[in-house]
Every structure is written in structure tokens, then in C-alpha cells.
Image (cartoon, rainbow, N blue to C red):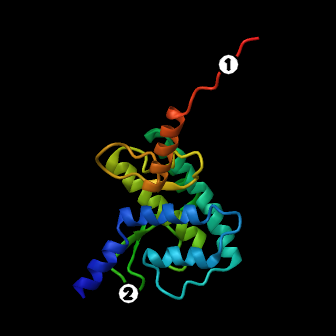
Amino acid sequence: MSSHRDDWSARHSVLTTARRTAALVNALADERPDPVDVADVLRAYGETDPVDLTTRDIAGMRAAAALLREVFAAEHTDDAAAVLNQLLRDHTGPLRLTSHDGTTPWHPHLDRDDNAPWDEWLLASSCMALTVLLWDRRCPPGRICASASCPNVFVTQGSGPERRYCSRRCATRERVAAHRRSRSPEPSSEAG
């Protein structure tokens, strides 16, 4: 039983939950996200089948994702904390512990009950994880990609240089574009 609990804890760690939040915010950013794609993200982060999402579920999750995007958009710790405090005040229930009737290890929840709607669960679990990351690291828990062509959010990683891009692909694309701009000839300005 211990390995099952260890596996569950790794899949539902604070950092993993925050990364799931970013992945869902990104998947739900499309005007009409495909429920199959959203369900695939949920499965990739440990949700078990069946993951049946209705168009109403997706609409609610999109609204929750739009609220969560504001946390990633906050550039300063105080701003991220203010957004999280507002979300916690307006959209979550009291902190409680659950084991889902003994099927999981005990863990905290902020949604109303174990069968809360997807949007309530997404907002509550995401607020919990992002709050703990801000508390632990004393900085905003994530960012929006600095690439002008990419709207994706990402969770910032601990030590090392500050991340500005959601992926190596975006960082490389921007670095190559900057290099090309620096090597292109200056447009001549002819005064007449």
C-alpha cells in the first residue's frame, strides 16, 4: 500500500498540481477547447477514467482558467498574493481534509465536497497549489511566456536564472529572431 500512496503523493504534489494548473489554463485558452484534449491533460496529471467533460464543464473550466491566468500575469509577489486572496475569498470553501472515502491518502481541499463540479475543483485546487508556491518561494508562482507569439503560462522553477519563456522552443525562437534582427542591415534613411 505504501507504493500506491507514494505514487499518489508524487502525482498530486503542490508543484505537480501547479503544473497541471498551467497546462489546463493553456488548454482552455482556445475559444472552443476540445473536451478530449482537456480530458487528456487531466489524465496526464493523474485523473482516472472516466473523465467525461460536457460543454458546460468546459465553459465553467474556461471561466476558472481565465481567473487563474491573472495569477500568472502578476509580475510582483504582492500582486499575485492579492489575486490569490481575492480568488480564495470569492471562489473557495473552507479548508478541509479528505481521503475520498479511503481511496486516497488524506489531503487538503478547498472545494465544497469531493464531488464538486470541475470548474470549482480546478479553481480551488489550483488556488491551493499556487498559494503554497507563493508562500514557499516568496515570489509569483508563474508567468506568461515572454514570446510575443505565445500566450502560454508556466510555473516558474526554483533556483537558477529567472525563466522568461514557457519552453525551450519559445526561448530559441526568440533568440534566433533577435539574432536575425541584429544582423540585418539598417534601413537607409535618405533625407530629401
Q: Amino acid at mark 2?
A: Thr
Image quadrant assignment for residue 107: bottom left
Question: In this orientation, which residue lies closer to the viewer: 92 or 59?
Answer: 59
Question: So how many labels did they put on this image?
Answer: 2
Measuring 48% from the left and 38% from the top, which residue is drawn there? 179
Q: Picture coordinates of residue 88 (x, y %)? A: 52, 56
Q: Label 1: how many residues lie within 10 Å, few (<14), some (14-19) or many (20+)?
A: few
The residue wearing badge 1 is 189
The image quadrant where one finds the N terminus is: bottom left
> Which one is closest to the eye, mark 1 or mark 2?
1
Front position in the image: 30 or 107? 30
Q: Residue furthest left?
A: 2
Where is residue 175? Give x, y as percent. Answer: 46, 43
Q: CA distance from mark 1 to mark 2?
A: 72 Å
- Examine the rendering and report whether any part of residue 83 can be seen: no
Q: Where 172 falls versus 98 (above or below)?
A: above
| 159 w.r.t. 129: above or below | above
Question: For the residue marked with disc 1, what is the amino acid?
Answer: Ser
User: Above or below — where is 31 with respect to 117?
Assistant: above
Q: Is residue 8 left or right of residue 81?
A: left
* 169 with respect to 8 (left or right): right
Cβ–Cβ under 8 Å for marks 1 and 2: no
The residue labelled by disc 2 is: 103
Using the rendered image of the protein, determine whether residue 159 is visible from the camera's viewpoint.
yes
Secondary structure at numbered mark 1: loop
